[in-house]
Amino acid sequence: MTGNEAVARGAYEAGVSFASAYPGTPSTEILENVGTYREITAEWAPNEKVAMEAAIGASMAGVRSMAAMKHVGLNVAADPIFTFAYMGVSGGMVFVSADDPGMHSSQNEQDNRNYAKFMKIPMLEPSDSQEAKDMFRDAFDLSEKYDTPVMFRMTTRVCHSKSLVELGERREFAAIPYVKNRMKNDNVPAVARNLRVKMLERDRRLAAFTNDCPYNFAEYNGSKKIGIVTSGISYQYAKEVFGDSASYLKLGLTNPLPMDMIREFRSNVDTLYVIEELDPFMEEQIKAAGIDCVGKEKIPLVGELNPNIVRKALLDEDVPEISFNQNLIVDRPPTLCAGCPHRGFFYECAKRSDTVMVGDIGCYALGGSEPLNAKDMAICMGAAFSLAHGLSKAFLASGQDKTVVACMGDSTFFHTGINSLEEVVYNDSRVICCILDNRITGMTGHQENPGTGYTLQGEPATIMDIETIVRALGVERVRTVNPLRLNDMKEALDWAYREVHEGPVVLITRWPCVLKKLSTEDRREFRPVPSVCIVHHDQCIGCKKCLTTGCPALSFDKYERKVSIDALQCDGCTVCAQVCPKQAITKGAKRA
Amino acid sequence: MKRDDTKSVLLVGVGGQGTILASKILTAGLIAAGYDVKMSEVHGMSQRGGSVSTQVRYGTKVYSPIIGRGQADILVAFETMEAIRYLPDLKPGGKVVVNDYQMPSLPILSGEREYPDNILEELRDKADTLVLDAAAIARDNDNPKGMNVVLLGALIQSLGLQNIDWATALRSCVKSRFVDVNLRCLDAGMHASERMAV
Ligand SMILES: Cc1ncc(C[n+]2csc(CCOP(=O)(O)OP(=O)(O)O)c2C)c(N)n1
Ligand code: SF4
Ligand code: SF4
């Protein structure tokens, strides 16, 4: 199983009954797999804060509960969990933070282990799938015994690597009957002051326990010259490089650190290395405890580790590589899919001058790449409208004549984009806010969201209509448009550019992602007919205008000076045909 | 010290080519045959068409799920240019199984760059290389979409793992109505010798 599947299995075996998450690589498959166990109520939440709060509520009601998110998701969810750390649990509560060293698919590589220390809660770090399953199961006992939420910290390589796992049985866990207890659960200042003291006392008990925790163990091999303190995936890299030629202190419960154990291990080895990815989380604490070790002076602070990096850093051994002609490599950047509805929007936006385009996080982030090149900036989910608000106000005050356009997807709008739009409306800025509604959470692999009308398990849910919500927030200038009809898209933008002088404008583009499995409602609304476009070579003049749409189904033959369309990839969206000045591209039926 | 019997396989291609299915079948077969196996894939973005890779490591006891540069024993490329992109990951003296199948990337589609010629020559020059026209082999076996399984067959042959019960492994990974055509492709791949696209 993958680490993510193993966590889901651990939840099942631990008798978890409530789980909530918001998708985000590399954590997404955790909830998708939890959702396959009928014994567990599993739900997509609109964002990570909501997921965390729902799981906290379930714990208060006396059942075992969990939440899962990617590292940046924990920033969003930090508010409730920091305070819940004071209060402690009723049913065991564990949340997953899936970090992404190397930023395979993230906007930063923050090291969330720091959060566990900051929140004063125990943290477990598995190093393979078997540990992911066992530790996740046992984390609930830890949570209940020490009356604390537990952080379960994974990284991309643990989440997405497969290794063998021995399964166990589910242990049913009877709900602890709910009893009102304001001194524990109602964190007004007078209560919180007491709980803060209790929390520090818990931290001391945990600091003692961590030295006896079976997930922290020493592995002495023949040679005691080199000792290595390590955790998570770094343990595997260390073993790969040093094998039996070193001794190890493998840590699973890494907050609080087992300082007595580390001190004893240190006394048994000649040199102590600390091998960890990203921040010197363990190293700093070890050094602060007066224990001499070698860490980040040799191991990189940036990016993902791998066996080669560890080998080079600590043994100064290079791995020979094949040298070859580098000119034979041409980049293969990710692109919006053929037929992607976002293409029409960006194609029309790219033409406008004196425009600052604020983007957000989702597939439409690719609207900034060549050849569309229609984006100036992006920070984090839901930020586009608020960022644009600040830009717009400052441009106005400083006499810079720019039109500010901002865009985000449907899932991002429901995540935190609604708040972002409130800012634009409440404080009345001149921003063109675009919601690119492709009827699904695309980037992370097509999860349902509050706008799609279905739950995680595919059961019908209330459809929250974006246009109705936007109007209810008080926006008067709202239009919904099909982004694949370029004339309509252009006209809507012309209208928005005129109207924005009067007040906030919202444009909603509405067409489904080409990779979405369409629902009955989608079929009724969009009436898809499988089709492809073809280029009539007798009419193609080789002007390459269609290529400016950046569709990967189009290719240009240099010698013939003609464009062709790959029928396997083409979705028949006709964006290229609408751009062609010679009407050389027409649409036909897709052959089966 | 690295255990001598751990083998590292790197499968690379373009999103949508079925590298993940191939590595799933490979993993299932290896596990059934009693190996310790670790597999790692990086995915995260939905869009089709990016460069993708999957790593499979097997042996008596495997630690790291990922292969460092210059450490793969064999590189299987589902697309020709991807073979050269990942060549630095191959151990000097390692093997390459490459599909003679070109998928131009955006800079090539737009006419800004050309699809490089001579990739196969460069590969042959630098490594022990087997070139296959997996598309043609798949077509000959009535399964135009079976390119990935043909390449898997060739990989199995190159690793000398023909004796494992691959039929069962394949059955556990594909829908029953696709089992027969895929078995034929797998077999064709295992018996394939050098073949280039014409
Ligand atoms: C706080 C946070 N949570 C989750 C993610 C992961 N993530 C990146 S894009 C995305 C979904 C975007 O969906 P949508 O806005 O509908 O746009 P689409 O990809 O469908 O175009 C998610 C969940 C993130 N980057 N940050
Ligand atoms: S997955 Fe959907 S939204 Fe994302 S690029 Fe492809 S078509 Fe567009
Ligand atoms: S119609 Fe044109 S733009 Fe649309 S998918 Fe086909 S080739 Fe691409």
Image: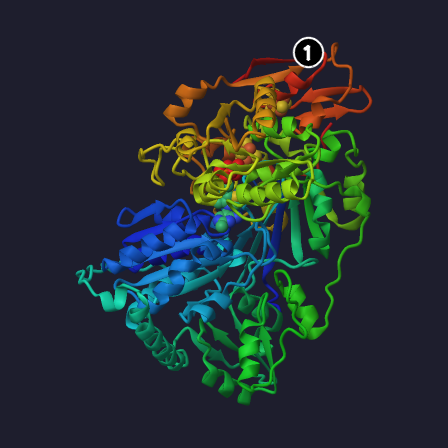
- Residue at image position (43%, 27%) is A518
Q: Chain of mark 1?
A: A
Q: Amino acid at mark 1?
A: Gln
- Residue at image position (69%, 40%) is A399
- Residue at image position (69%, 27%) is A351
- Return the x and y of residue A169 as percentages of the image width and height: 28, 58
Place residue A339 in its image quadrant: top right
**For the N terminus of chain B, which image quadrant?**
bottom right
- Return the x and y of residue A136 as percentages of the image width and height: 37, 62
Q: Quadrant of ligand 2?
A: top right
Between A75 and B67, which is closer to the camera in this rendering?
Answer: A75
Side of A335 relative to B197 (left or right): left
Task: Give the residue at mark 1.
Answer: A583
Residue B36 visible in image: no
**For the C terminus of chain B, which image quadrant?**
top right
Place residue A225 in its image quadrant: bottom right
